[in-house]
Amino acid sequence: MKLLKTLILAISLALQACAINPVSGKRDFAIVSEPEEIRQGRQYHNDIIARYGIYDDPRLQQYVDRIGQQLAAKSHRSHLDYEFTVLDSPEINAFALPGGYIYITRGIMAYLDSEAELAGVLGHEIGHVTARHSVRQQSGQAASSILSVLITAATGAQSLGDISQQIGTGLVRGYGREHELEADRLGAEYLHNSGYDPETMLEVIGVLKDQEVYEKALASKEGREAQTYHGVFSTHPRNDDRLKTVVRAARKLSSQAYRDDNRSTYHRMIDGLVWGPSPKQGIVVDNRFAHPELGFALQLPDDWKVRNNPDFLFARDPDSGAILQIGLVQRKKDESMPDLLRRLTENDDLAVSKTDYGVSAKTRVKPRGGEAQPARLSAIPLRESHALTLLGTAATKKYPAAEKKILAVNRSFTRLDQAQIDAIKAPRLHIVDRKSHSFASLSRQSAIDHDAESILRLLNRAFPSGDINSIDKLKIVTLDE
């Protein structure tokens, strides 16, 4: 009888949760009201900004917002207060929060080539908002949770999930094939209604598909997870007939002459765009890691692969498999440097030695899915309450040779004076007239620190084997003067 009452209650809640979809005009199962949807967006917006930061270019921010607002005004939910933000991230991504908060990274903007292409990406994300994809995803997962409640009532097993975690998965990884196609159809419609040719979306998809193919091959080679745009580009090949059909349907909505794609304006806007990790995370040039805000520099081994993430810097020796992770930790009040290492290793008996740069200790770590292996953990005081940590490790047989390189990195630590900090140059994207006659020669002058020729080809729509002589304006990456 108790199970029957629970079932009746669940069905009653499901019927009450049906709402009119603003795009289709039909009833959808949706347990989240529009005010709650907006509240969620506002709440998670603060988390996004805290993680990525806003790109410090008011002119570019205003430009992206203006294009986004034009598209949103032609959407099915034009009454929402949309907010468009360029994130200070090299990731190739764009995504939307519930309620009209839309983000695009400077990383993806480097690969776009016109205002119309920018509008295509923003239109796709607006489509996710207008079709309430995050709400529909939450509601579908909640329906599964209702089922799990019934299972719990019958078996006593607990299986409810965290709704905030479910929302985050959709934001970063996309909403599945059908929702991504719907977002493309809506984006194409909003482009058409705003005077942009919806066919531009197919060009964007082709470009980012090339980037995805390259990134997946590189990630496989380096033994890491690929970082690609979450949207339709991860679920459709560029020649997908369904994709072409939904995009080209927008042209049939009305007869009109489309505006210019405004390539020259877009080029002016992205000229000088920061390339790679934010200078706030430190800058890596020729495997020298310099951090202008924290005022220090380290030299990493020349042949190691380096990846500068928002939370830490990761370096790996492709030959031995040795790895080094460098991060920033907060010290407790009155905590000594040796005690910091003992806390981090959870070993009160850890033998810690003092060095010219800080403190260091031998320890052991267990890589994910592997056996415990030797490691060295070092810490260098930076500010009164923070320390730089360097954790290096390798398989037991490889460790003795790897430790010498790890210790060399530690000893390379240098505190920078203001003149040295002012001299740090950040790589930036620039638009120039073509003078070089090959991507190989162009790559030798580039500030791109890894596989410059392939990346320059991707930036200039010539991947994998296009002719540079057919390009009038080139995207290059150089250090600040």
Image (tube, rainbow, N blue to C red):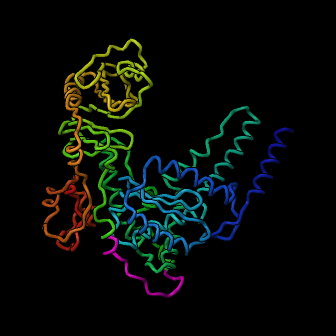
Compared with 415, 39 (above or below) is below
Q: Residue at x 47, y 87 (%)?
A: 256
Quadrant into which the N terminus falls: top right
Location of residue 61 (image quadrant): bottom left
Near-viewer residue (479 or 447):
479
How many tags in the picture?
A: 0
Near-viewer residue (80 or 97):
80
Quadrant into which the C terminus falls: bottom left
Compared with 472, 112 (above or below) is above
Near-viewer residue (101 or 292):
292
Residue 168 coordinates in the image, percent (x, y): 53, 48
Residue span colored magenta: 251-267
Residue 333 coordinates in the image, percent (x, y): 44, 24
Image position of 231 (left or right of 397): right
Residue lying at the far right of the rendered structure: 1
Compared with 396, 265 (above or below) is below
Task: Let me know if residue 259 is in the magenta part.
Answer: yes
Residue 199 coordinates in the image, percent (x, y): 42, 75
Residue 4 coordinates in the image, percent (x, y): 84, 43
Image position of 24 (left or right of 89): right
Image position of 71 (left or right of 281): right
Q: Residue at x 40, y 73 (%)?
A: 116
